[in-house]
Structures are given as structure tokens and as C-alpha cells.
Image (cartoon, rainbow, N blue to C red):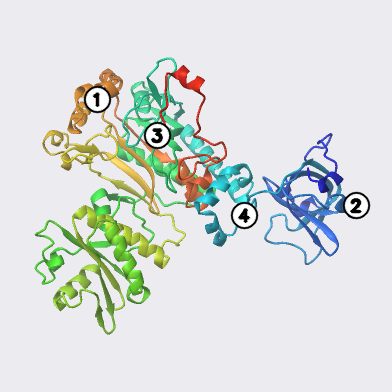
Amino acid sequence: MTSGERTLPLEEMGDWVRTKGAGELRAEDAGREVVLMGWVARRREHGGVTFLDLRDRSGVAQVVLAEELAARAAHLRVESVVAIRGEVVRRPEGMVNPSMPTGEVEVRAAELRLLSPAKTPPIYTDDLPASARTAESGEAAEVMRLRYRYLDLRRPRLQRNLAVRHRLVKVTRDYLDELGFLEIETPNLTRSTPEGARDYLVPARIAPGKFYALPQSPQLFKQLLMIAGLERYFQIARCYRDEDNRADRQPEFTQIDIEMSFVDEKGVEDLVEGLMARIWRETLGVELRVPFPRLTYDEAMLRYGCDKPDLRFGLEIADVTERVAGSGFRVFGEAGARGEVVRGLGVPGGAALFSRKDLDQLTEQARAGGAQGLVWMAFEPSGLRSPAAKLLEPSAVDRLAEGLGCREGDLALLVAAPEPTAATVLGQLRSSVARRLGLCDTGEWRFVWIVDYPLFEPGEIPGTWAPMHHPFTAPADGQADLLETDPARVRSKHYDLVLNGYELGSGSIRNRHRELQERVFRAMGLPPDEYLERFGFLLEALEYGAPPHGGIALGLDRIAALLVGEENIREVIAFPKTTRGTCPLTGAPASVGEDQLRELGISVSES
């Protein structure tokens, strides 16, 4: 307690009982005596009168201190916890604050008790305007916010975020319960299995030299629940992946995990569409249009350059390889002979909107993505402006303009590269151009299913194959015979749900026959002793009558962030980690004592 605050004695609640939330006061409460309890958000003097803004989880109320109370509370610090007893009165004419839900009234305090003093906070505890939030985006600011997360969480914005997250979880539970799903917990201490990222390992004291793994997902257990005959399972599941963090990734995260028996792809997709419609209706009051559109993986890659396209704007990519075949500009004209493609996108009005500096930056971005460069063409009233203007014959320019839908005033961005590189680079350029032009700020919710994925993608070792998602995904009907002869052509019963350029969920119909599952493992190059060691328990279970089953894992953190308009999922998680995977609040990860290490049979070498 500061010396000034000693003028206000530290007291207990005593017989006082809070009768109202600060943010719940309305004009109809005028004339009532209330007891409010909360934090001092602000103290100010105006016209010889002392005002306190009192904040609790429900909101903020303005309190007017009588002269004797004002003198006693003259040195009361913000964030101190106080109790107020007083009368609710209407604010004087001209003093109403329409921006506050409680802005029509104030509380004239008759008594004030200091319940807990506070030091000066080292970080802001009020909401910063959006324009000022960039000041908190650096690593040092992030560390400070998370070091004092209990203060950071006092911000009304973060409390609203967590309230929406709570509502999202409740709606999900209610919806799935109504449809006959059972919420079942699966183990957090399990064995290490490959699921696309490194595992977090937990040493087992009872088995020296052996380890549990924290689950990257409940994938195997939810399949076992279907084999067990539970038929409809869900879980608000905690998952753990040791991978590099970013704005939409945390080492520990939460999934809405769902699995169903006796369904096909459409059955899962219909269920999820109903869940999304219910969530948006009950959290935002927004009616979604269902069913959601569907795009094949190949179509998404061709038109948008990625498998999580943002459909709030056009800027579709076009393949113009044939239109420039044989052109004197060899970069384009001989692309097909080199096994490459020529693809591009047209930017309406872009000729005047992008400076040479902007175009140089886009060129560097294309090179960073793996392309040799970027050819840009500005169709200006005076003619074509482009570094390749002297190399492209007029007929080739006309064919390119037609293929890209470009007219006078437009800008064309073109890449000649192997197909995967061209798709990736132009997908990144499409997003950059859209942000530059403000095309994402439409207020729309554009969901899309991406379907018909390849089962495999090239592995890290040339000539090997890795599952595009996970090895338990079933091949598409009629495709299993390609597992041994042409794995690259095998399509899968996999589906992703995408919203505004973000992947919300990923799921599939699963393999339910041991023989087929083993063929998938062998196509991946896994020897029998390895897959039996890791997945033998699942393979054995598949021999005891596994029903057709499938499901999906939806990213709860990402859904919550989109609902509240946050770019970083950290803003919807109570106690997140930094981008380096550390917790500044608790100091985790941290060293442990030698006694603990000896008990676990572990020695630590200095790096």
C-alpha cells in the first residue's frame, strides 16, 4: 500500500454483498441503492467533483465521490479493488455518454471501502484503439504482455474474447448433444506416433528410459471409440505439437474433435455446416448460407494457388501456357518444353495503383517463393509498360491480356515455373495484392470445402511418399489399386473446411480394413516392423469389426479468433506462449532439480 492509500483504511467486505455488476446499471435502476465491487479503471477531477470509473467483468460504471470520500481517496491508485455503496441517479442533462451502456446513469457514493491496493501497472489494462495495437506486436511488447498476463486479461477486449470463446464451446456442446454425440475424454499420456510434427515427450519414472508423448490429436483413440461401438463421439480436446510457432499456431491448442460411424464425406460435411451455422447465429446473430460451396484440391490450386483460398475477392489465377507457346520471349515460349507452366493474374485498375517500387517488392516476393522472377505488364492508355515489352510480340500480349481478362488500366503479374512453384508464388502474390488493395475488408463470411485431395505428397527423401494429411485417411473409391503402382495419382476421402483464407478444420473418412491400412503404410515406405511397433494396436482392432467411420478436427482457437476479429489466436487464449514457445509469466520451460532427474534416470548435457 502506498503512503497516500493509507488515508483510506484497508477493509474487508464485511456484511456488504455486491448487488449489481458495474456494467449492468441502466436508467431503470435510478433511485436504487447498490453495492458495486471492482477495480478502479480511472480517477479524474472535473469541476471540483471527483469521479471514478469502476470496472468489473460486466463493464464500467461512473461513480461520483462525495467531498469527504474524495479527500480520503485522493491517492487511490488505478487497479485498486474497491467496494462502493451508493444511489443510482440519472446523469445531468448534457452529460449522458451514449458510447457507454451505462452512460445514462452514475452512482453517488455514500461509502467506499478499499479491499485491495494496487501498484502502478507495468502495462496498459484498458483497450488500445486498433491503430495503436501495432505498438504491442513486437517481441518485447509481447513478452511484457504475457509476463503480466493477469493484468493484460483485465482489458475489456480480452474479456469479451474469452466470453465469446466460452459461448462457442457451449453452443458446440449443446448442438452435438442434441444430435446424440457423447463427450468422451481420451488420454493425454500416450505413445509417440508420427502425425506431421515433433512430439512433446514426458519421461516415465515407472519405466526408466521410456517416455509418454502428449497427443498431437486424439486421432487413434477416436477411431478406437468407433470400433468400440460408441458411434458418435466429440471432445473439446487439448493437443500438443512441437513445431515453430506463428500467429495462428501455439504449442498447445484446442480442437473440436468429432468422429462418427456409418457416414460418408457428405454426412460429416452436413453436420459441420449445421454446427457452423449454429455458432454464427448464437454468437454473432449472423445467418450463414448453407450448404457451403465445394472446390476440388486441383481447382483450388489452379485458381487460387493454395488449398485455403480466400473467396472474399476475385483475382483468380489463369494458366496461359498454351497462349504463349512458341513466343519469341523464350521464358514464356519454351516453358512447356521445359516442363513448366506460365500462370498469371490480372489486377483490375492495378496499372495506376502499383508503383515501380511496389512491383519490385512483388518481384522479390516471387523470388523468395522459388520463382526465377516475376513478369509484370501494365496496360496503360499510352501502351504497354513492362520490362518484357520489347521481348513480347503484340500478338502474344493480346493473347495474354485475353487469357487474364486484362483491359486498359489493368496490371498483369506472370510467372513461368514448375507447376507447384507457380501455384504457390501466385497464391502468395494474390494475397499480397488483395491486402494492398483492401479487398479483404468486405465483412463477409466465405466458407468453402476443399475436397478430392491427393492421398500422398513427395516425402523429404526423393522417391518416397508422405501422407498429405495423415496415414489413416481412406483412398477414394476405386483408387486403392494405385497404391502399389502409382501412389502420386491416388486421391483420398479427405476434406478441409476453409473460411476467408484460414483452414478451420481437417477431416476424412478412415481406413477400416487392416489389409488396406497396411498397404497405405507400405506405400509410405514404412517397413512392417516399424508400423507394427507404432500402430499394431490399431491394426489389431481393425480385425474385430470396424464400422465405416470418419470425422473432423476443427480449430477452436482459430474459430474464436475469427468470431472476435483477431488475427492472432493468442488473443483468445487465456495463458498462451510466446512465438518462441515460452511462458514469461511462469518461466516455463525451466530447469528441474538434480533429484528429479536422477529419479527419472535422465542426465542433461550442456550444449
Quadrant in the rendering for residue 515: top left
**Up-down: is 92 above or below 486?**
below
Determine the residue positioned at 47% across, 43% down: 557
Element on which disc 1 rests: helix
Q: Position of residue 246 (x, y in %)?
A: 42, 47
Please give the name of the residue rendered at 39% of the width and 22% of the height, measured from the top-left corner. Answer: 211
**In this rendering, is residue 18 above or below 292?**
above
Question: How far apart in space, not on screen, are marks 2 and 1 (Cα)?
Answer: 78 Å
For residue 127, the mark is 4
Residue 188 place in picture, x, y as percent: 44, 26
Instruction: Look at label 1 and name its amino acid.
Output: Tyr
Q: In the rendered image, which residue does mark 1 sit on? A: 531
The kind of residue tagged 4 is: Asp
- Give the amino acid type for the residue marked by disc 3 in the picture: Ser
**Mark in front: 4 vs 3:** 3
Q: Could you tell me how far apart the alpha carbons at marks 2 and 3 are, in whole angstroms?
A: 64 Å
What type is the residue that disc 2 sits on?
Glu
Q: Are marks 2 and 3 in contact (CB under 8 Å)?
A: no
What's the CA distance linking mark 1 and mark 4? Answer: 52 Å
Task: Name the residue carrying label 3.
Answer: 607
* Total tally of numbered discs in the picture: 4
